Image (cartoon, rainbow, N blue to C red):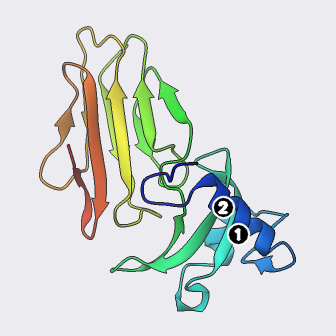
Amino acid sequence: MAEVQGGLTEQQVRDIITANASTSFVGGTATTPTTVANLIASFPPSPTYMGQYARVSDLYGAVDDIMRCRFDGVAYRWIPQRPNFAGVATTTSGSISILPLVTPPTLRLTGTLLGNMSVVPSATNAFIGQQQRVIMDGVLGLFTTTITGLIGSNLSLLGGGAKLIEYGPTGWFSAG
């Protein structure tokens, strides 16, 4: 099985769980995962947990996967071992917050916009190198979709298409 960019393969994740079946993971066990919210609230990323694994049941809202506490050059963070392994969130209208570890890495905006739409990435729980792809393949009509809160300037999806943003040491920025 191929490696997902920036992380472990499915087989490597299974091997970690199998090898540690009798060992407690942070916040649970290999067979009894915790939630992302509980992991972060009860076991804040710190030198205490550096290098340790945690199994979560709701990464990106629904993915059962493994996270590891690491130092990303700025802070200690719980980082998914397969950061791009998740479904696609879809929506058709309103403002949207991108919530790291909750919103899947790809956000597809579909349907006909009923008003201007803002997509706002949050820095809470974001990790250096985290990427988010925003795709607008719906009907814009008279309205626009804008990714706001980025370093430098906002990004408009005026004509549709896709934009990639990435989290860096000082916040979210356009990556393409």
Query: Residue lying furthest front in this view?
Result: 1
Residue 13 numbered tag = 2
Other-residue count near label 1 (Cα within 10 Å), few / some / many at <14 / 14–19 / ≥20: few
Q: Quadrant of the C terminus?
A: top left
The residue identified by callout 1 is 16
**4 sits left or right of 151 in the view:** right
Q: Residue at x 18, y 56 (%)?
A: 151
Residue 173 numbered tag = none
Q: Residue 28 at x, y = what percent?
A: 80, 71
Secondary structure at badge 2 equals helix
How far apart in space, not on screen, are marks 1 and 2 (Cα)? 5 Å
Can residue 162 be seen by looking at this rendering?
A: yes
Q: Residue 57 at x, y = what percent?
A: 73, 54
Decide: marks 1, 2 in contact (CB < 8 A)? yes
Question: Residue 61 occupies which quadrant of the picture?
Answer: top right
Can residue 29 be seen by looking at this rendering?
A: no
Secondary structure at badge 1 equals helix
Q: Nearer the viewer, residue 51 or 158?
A: 51
Question: Residue 13 occupies which quadrant of the picture?
Answer: bottom right
**13 sits left or right of 104 in the view:** right
Q: Amino acid at mark 1?
A: Ile
Question: Residue 19 occupies which quadrant of the picture?
Answer: bottom right
Q: Amino acid at mark 2?
A: Val
Q: Residue at x 25, y 16 (%)?
A: 143
Query: Residue lying furthest bottom in this view?
Result: 48
Q: Residue 115 at x, y = what percent?
A: 33, 18
Q: Residue 21 at x, y = what percent?
A: 84, 72
Other-residue count near label 2 (Cα within 10 Å), few / some / many at <14 / 14–19 / ≥20: some
Q: Residue at x 49, y 51 (%)?
A: 4
